[in-house]
Image (cartoon, rainbow, N blue to C red):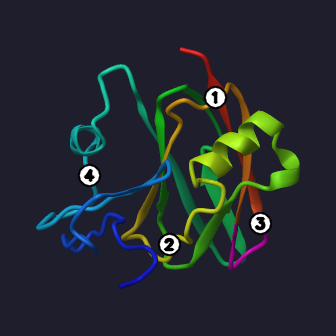
Amino acid sequence: MELLRGLWDRSGVRRGCLPLVAAGILLLGGCDRSGPPSDPELRAELGLGDAASIHRITITGQADRTRLLPAYLEVVRGDVVQFEVRDRRVHQVIFPSDDLTGDVRSFLEGTGQMAPPPLTSPEVRLVLSFEGAPSGAYPFRVDGYAPSVSGRIMVRDP
């Protein structure tokens, strides 16, 4: 079983079959599914209330260029962010420790979200929870086959 077990798989088979909720990183999947979760399915799987929103950041690229859509995202404490890959290359989402404030770094380390596993194909998703997150900037970068690209998630109070 790969490190990415539990991420959504477009083939409809969940790697691991039970949701993995590990110290704040939510790696999700679904048995006998035909694709990634819809927002209502993801909301039910995570037990999210109606107040929490699900946001997406798409990672894509061609030749020697990687793009983030969007590169800047504002969320409210309690929301989740889903990273999706749209190409067939490996991408790693990294929160550089030196770029984070103490509160933000402590939150990411305490929830196990500081170093998520790499995204290896379009069939997988990475879902990060900002439940209980301190307000502030969460700068990240995506490393992979092309030069790194930077993004920022801004967490606001509800």
Do residues under tags 2 and 1 come within 8 Å of each other at their CB atoms?
A: no
Residue 1 belongs to magenta span? no
Q: Nearer the viewer, residue 79 or 104?
A: 104
Q: Give the mark, 2 or 1, whose residue is nearer the N terminus.
A: 2
Helix, strand or loop at disc 2? Answer: loop
Q: Which kind of residue does numbered mark 4 sit on?
A: Pro
- Res. 156 image quadrant: top right
Badge 2, how many Cα within 10 Å: few under 14, some, many 20+? some
At 29% from the left and 58% from the top, the residue drawn is: 19
Rounded to the nearest angstrom, the CA distance separating label 4 from label 2 is: 19 Å
Helix, strand or loop at disc 1? Answer: strand
**Disc 1 target residue:** 155
At 55% from the left and 69% from the top, the residue drawn is: 117
Q: Is residue 51 left or right of residue 19?
A: right
Do residues under tags 2 and 3 come within 8 Å of each other at their CB atoms?
A: no
Badge 4, how many Cα within 10 Å: few under 14, some, many 20+? some
Q: How far across and down, in percent of the image, does residue 10 sit?
A: 27, 69
Do residues under tags 4 and 3 come within 8 Å of each other at their CB atoms?
A: no
Q: Is residue 112 left or right of residue 95?
A: left
**Disc 4 target residue:** 37
Magenta residue span: 143-148
Q: Which kind of residue does numbered mark 3 sit on?
A: Ser
Q: Nearer the viewer, residue 99 or 143?
A: 99
Helix, strand or loop at disc 4? Answer: loop
Q: Give the mark, 1 or 3, whose residue is nearer the N terminus.
A: 3
Q: How far across and down, in percent of the image, does residue 95 sit?
A: 72, 54
Disc 4 versus disc 2: nearer the observer: 4
Numbered circle sitting on residue 87: 2
Rounded to the nearest angstrom, the CA distance separating label 4 from label 1 is: 24 Å
Badge 1, how many Cα within 10 Å: few under 14, some, many 20+? many
Helix, strand or loop at disc 3? Answer: loop
**Disc 3 target residue:** 148
